[in-house]
Image (cartoon, rainbow, N blue to C red):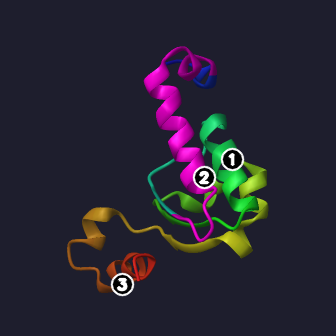
Amino acid sequence: MGGEKAVSIGLYPNLKWYHDQFRGILLRRSARLLIIGYSFSDAHINDAIVEGLANGLKISIVDPYALSALKRDPRIEKKRSESVIGISTRPLTATFGGDRNAHAQISQFFA
């Protein structure tokens, strides 16, 4: 879709609907978002996450580069202490391949 994803999404009703649904769910009270392997490089996604964080959204991140990825959007990094409920830097192959600590950490998200 290129660098202007937000503009492109607006051109396609189905994509706009999906994005509106995503944003709406993030704005729900007690919403939680499990983020796996996201670089925090898409402004339209980050904007929806930031709106959700302002409304109480809690996030958990699974990514070997999670800490550096969070820094890509200072708005999200700023909310880290109050909104990020978990970070796992272990790859999913380890998490589901015998790493009990990483598995327990992700499992807490669903508790």
User: Which quarter of the picture shows residue 91?
Assistant: bottom left
User: Quick check: is 33 in the magenta stretch?
Assistant: no
Pick whichever, 38 or 32, lies toward us. 32
* 3 left or right of 95 in image: right
Q: What residue type is disc 2 on?
A: Ala
Q: Position of residue 58 (x, y in %)?
A: 61, 69
Q: Are marks 1 and 2 in contact (CB under 8 Å)?
A: yes
Q: Position of residue 61 (x, y in %)?
A: 51, 64
| Helix, strand or loop under label 2 | helix
Pick whichever, 70 or 56, lies toward us. 56
Name the N-terminal-most of marks 3 and 1.
1
Pick whichever, 54 or 65, lies toward us. 54
Reading the image, the residue beneath label 2 is 69
Tell me the tag on residue 97: none
Q: Position of residue 56 (x, y in %)?
A: 69, 68
User: Which quarter of the picture shows residue 66?
Assistant: bottom right
Residue for point 56% across, 38% down = 20
The crowd level at tag 2 (other Cα within 10 Å; few <14, some 14-19, many 20+) is some
Tell me the tag on residue 72: 1
Name the N-terminal-most of marks 3 and 2.
2
Residue for point 24% across, 71% down = 96
Alpha carbon distance from label 1 to label 2: 6 Å
Residue for point 47% across, 27% down = 15
Q: What residue type is disc 1 on?
A: Arg
Reading the image, the residue beneath label 3 is 104
